[in-house]
Amino acid sequence: MGKLLKKLNEQYNFEISSGYIYYSMANYMKDKGMDGFAHFFNKQAEEEFEHAEKLRQFLFEVDVRPELESIEKPQVEFGNFTETFKTAYEHEQEVTRRINELVDLAAEEKDHRVTSLLQWYVDEQVEEEDNFRGIIERLERIGESWAGLYIYDGELGRR
Ligand code: FEO
């Protein structure tokens, strides 16, 4: 397996571990009685597994058998609700950094198949980051108001 495909396999694993982190955030929110926020993070986790699946399919298509690595135990305590979403946002920024690195490497290796695949991830990251920024902005406006928090919890529960 060449360097680029190895890195793609790494990203495949990273997407799965991202889902694992969001499951942990979902459990944290559920434990705090915020079922809507928990639902949001469960959905987010499912999306990460879809991102992983897309990479898995691609690897098979280019005749590489994807390899699973061990997954680090995720953080279990996340602070207040805004802080939790901020941690998720920072995680998405890390995903973006990794995708960009892959894009650069694909260009270096002139592998247009990978460049084409990665374009989808570049666009997806714009959406993910924007999404989290929007949520954080809302939460910062709501502040400590439980009434506001429960309304927003209900809203995100319908995601
Ligand atoms: Fe798969 Fe949220 O990036």
Image (cartoon, helix red, strand yellow):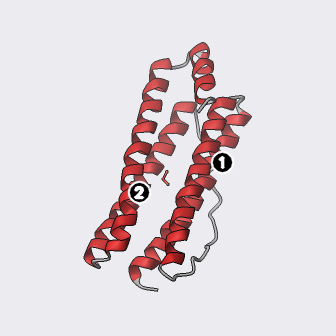
> Which amino acid type is marked by label 2?
Tyr
Considering every residue shown, the one lying at the far front of the view is 61
> Which amino acid type is marked by label 1?
Ser
Q: Is residue 149 left or right of residue 128?
A: right
Front residue of this view, candidates 153 and 85: 153
Taking 12 as reference, is 46 above or below it?
above
Taking 126 as reference, is 107 above or below it?
below
Front residue of this view, candidates 129 and 127: 127
Q: Position of residue 82 (x, y in %)?
A: 52, 32
What residue does disc 1 label? Answer: 24
User: Which residue: 32% across, 76% down?
Assistant: 111
Foreground disc of the pair 2, 1: 2
Of the numbered discs 2 and 1, the one sitting upstream in the chain is 1
The C terminus appears in which quarter of the rendering?
A: top right
Taking 41 as reference, is 16 above or below it?
below
Q: Position of residue 130 (x, y in %)?
A: 39, 39
User: Which residue: 59% across, 41% down?
Assistant: 78
Is the Cβ of the residue at disc 2 closer than 8 Å to that at disc 1?
no
Which element carries disc 2, helix, strand or loop? Answer: helix
Question: Quarter-wise, where is residue 147 in the image?
Answer: top right
Mark sitting on residue 121: 2
Q: Is residue 87 left or right of residue 147?
A: left
Question: Quarter-wise, where is residue 32 in the image?
Answer: top right
Viewer can see residue 77: no
Disc 2 CB within 8 Å of nearest ligand 1 atom = yes
Alpha carbons under labels 2 and 1: distance apart: 23 Å
Front residue of this view, candidates 45 and 150: 45
Q: Is residue 127 left or right of residue 79?
A: left
Which element carries disc 1, helix, strand or loop? Answer: helix
Q: Residues within 10 Å of mark 2 (few under 14, many from 20)?
A: some
User: Which residue: 57% across, 32% down?
Assistant: 80
Viewer can see residue 155: yes
